[in-house]
Image: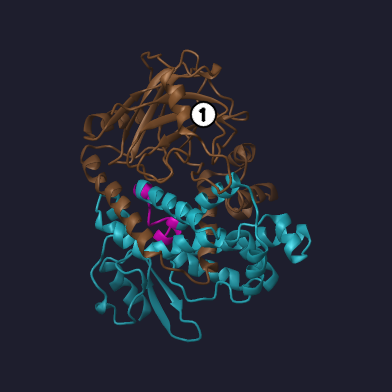
Chain colours: A brown, B cyan
Amino acid sequence: MTSFADWDDQTLDLCVEQFTVGLNGDGEATLGRLADPSDVEEFERAVAAVHLALLEEVEELPAAFRERLEQSGRRQVSLKAPAEHAGTTTVPHIVPPSVFPSVSPGTKLIAVSGWLIAASLLLILLPFGRNKRDVITMRDTLVADASDLVRAAWTATEDPAAAGASGEVVWSSARQEGYMRFEGLEPNDRAEGQYQLWIFDPTRADWEAKPVDGGVFDVPASGSAVVPIDPKLTVAETALFAITLEVPGGVVVSERERLVLTATPAL
Amino acid sequence: MVSAQLERAKEAGFVTLVAEPLFGQDTAQWRCVTGPQWGWCPEFPMTELSPPIEPLLMRVARGDADAVRDCLDRYGPLVWSVAKRAWSDLGTIEDVVQEVFIDVWKSAERFDPSKASEATFIATIARRRVIDRRRRMGRAPSHELIEESSASVEDAGLAEVDLGDEASLARRAISELKPDQRRVILMSVVEGLTHPEIASATGIPLGTVKSHIRRGLDQAAQRLRSGRRTDR
């Protein structure tokens, strides 16, 4: 194993950049070639420790916010126990968490009516394929065990990326866990753009304008994928799932220029 | 005497202990790293220490909902403070903190006390979220933040905040740096400014900024690694 002392300037520079301001995809790939992942992780922890060391003071969470955090956390954590007994394990996401939700003031908002109209126009439903066995196992476990499972088929829009695409989405609000399956969806070039999931939660304030970011993901050359949902906020209910094609890394607020798929759970 | 105390502590279930001199004092105090108590343990005798307690994240991993409350009590202020140094908008701060804890609940199974303290594990998740969001929202450091970080650099990191053994080791490494070096590391790591932004705010040449940050973080990383090896 190499040590930090053995790293050349380029490796150290990339590592520093990665864990201070973030690297783009090319930088990450280069760093991956140059350094042992365990060393890189160790360096990341060191930067986090430096951050802690530099914190001059810490401030309590606002009481009302803390209460909300605890309630949602309790729901999420209390459902881990049965999963463990069932022998499931956590597996890495196909796409590492790298996107964030929320809407900045003054930015263009998404109009849900447009999504719903698009959804109502669509009718394709086809069987779907599989990949990533461990993710499929987790998905199947969720489908078998979740008492509040929401299930909806994807319907394709007129976007060319969706031509012939099908699949479904499954989601459990109690577990804050869900998976998307796709078949026939146009493969994306990560350098050009990435798919992004949006979840419309009617219990959230201004939910029609501010869907929850469900994460960005890629579709391989086969056009088939099983992708864990990675919601950046707690989702209590689901009125609509929508997939857009966005710039690499995704966006905070979608301009809805490339709406690819939608899925509307049954009431 | 010290080694005998250490042996007794390990036998009692303390996985790791670090002896750390008290600031301004000659005497040493024991600090539990992955053992029953987080933070400063009572001074000797060790027999006054409580029995081993399961780490919080391990409780989270096995679905103990009460661990959520304890985790928020212990690490909520840490995560909140990390986010608050990055943004002033309350909505953004709340969103980020919520995202961080969703990640913490999800990834608690991955916590390995032999690699990091809980505080460092959670801070790592928080930093990933902050960096990612900054990249996605666009970078717009405020003058207020720059001025604040500049003004407080002399005291930065010297506060007695109990945030984990790695933070103590890192703090020691940082304390050995020159004020200018500490200043740019603070601006880079805590405020999230880019190298050019730091150079512009401080008047320090860009090459020197890069060198300060690189050297400082490398030094801290090596200090932590050697500290962990010594501890084993």
- The answer to whether residue B24 is above or below residue A89 is below
Q: Residue at position x 61%, y 57% from top? A: B192
Q: Nearer the viewer, residue B128 or A36?
A: B128
State left or right for residue B68 relative to residue A182: left
Q: Position of residue B185 (x, y in %)?
A: 63, 63
Q: Position of residue B168 (x, y in %)?
A: 49, 70
Is residue B17 covered in magenta? no
Q: Residue at position x 67%, y 54% from top? A: B194
Q: Residue at position x 64%, y 37% from top? A: A26
SS at mark 1 in the image: strand
Residue B34 seen anywhere in this rendered image of the structure: no
Q: Which residue is mark 1?
A: A244
Q: Label 1 amino acid?
A: Thr
Q: Residue at position x 33%, y 63% from top? A: B15
Q: Nearer the viewer, residue A44 or A235?
A: A235
Q: Position of residue B49 (x, y in %)?
A: 27, 75
* The residue stretch that appears in magenta: B107-122
Q: Chain of mark 1?
A: A
Badge 1, how many Cα within 10 Å: few under 14, some, many 20+? Answer: many
State left or right for residue A202 relative to residue B54: right
Residue B70 seen anywhere in this rendered image of the structure: yes
Q: Nearer the viewer, residue A56 or B58?
A: A56
Q: Position of residue B230 (x, y in %)?
A: 46, 65
